[in-house]
Amino acid sequence: MTPREYWNTYVERNGGPAKVSELTGVPLSTIAGVCNGSRGIGRRLAQRLAAADPMLDYKTLVWVTAKEAA
């Protein structure tokens, strides 16, 4: 499973981007940007997400990168 697949599975399992935003306290625009591939997850965001939900693996989250433009 790639880091992006790990993230997408987490979002799906937790009810979508809006619910993940509520659960983690991270703005919906940030979560949506990661979900649609326009941004990745940096160290600070990975720390915030992992602190908000212990089920998330910081070491995997930091490898979620933005998708390349076509």
Image (cartoon, rainbow, N blue to C red):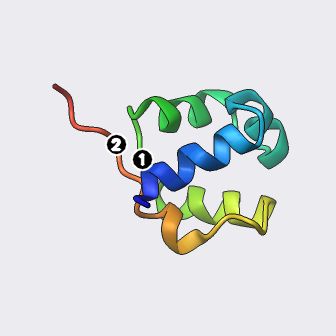
Residue at image position (69%, 65%) is 50
Q: Where residue 7 appears, x then y in whole percent?
A: 55, 50
Among the two numbered marks 2 and 1 on one chain, the one whose residue lies closer to the N terminus: 1
Task: Place residue 44 in its image quadrant.
Answer: bottom right
Of 69 and 14, which appears nearest the observer?
14
For residue 43, above or below residue 22: below
Residue at image position (46%, 64%) is 62
Disc 2 to disc 1, C-alpha distance: 4 Å
Query: Is residue 59 toward the left or the right of residue 20 in the image?
Result: left
Task: Place residue 55 in its image quadrant.
Answer: bottom right
- Label 1 packing within 10 angstroms: few (<14), some (14-19), many (20+): many
Q: Which amino acid does label 1 sit on?
A: Gly
Secondary structure of the residue carrying tag 1 is: loop
Q: Where residue 20 appears, x then y in whole percent?
A: 74, 40
Quick one: quadrant of the C terminus? top left
Q: Where residue 42 appears, x then y in whole percent?
A: 46, 57
Identify the residue under disc 2: 66
Residue at image position (60%, 27%) is 29
Q: Which mark is residue 40?
A: 1
Q: Which amino acid does label 2 sit on?
A: Ala
Task: Place residue 53 in its image quadrant.
Answer: bottom right
Are circles 2 and 1 on residues that touch, CB within 8 Å? yes
Query: Is residue 40 toward the left or the right of residue 18 in the image?
Result: left
Query: Is residue 19 toward the left or the right of residue 8 in the image?
Result: right
> Looking at this rendering, what residue extends furthest in the front direction?
1
Q: Where residue 22 appears, x then y in whole percent?
A: 83, 37
Quick one: quadrant of the N terminus? bottom left
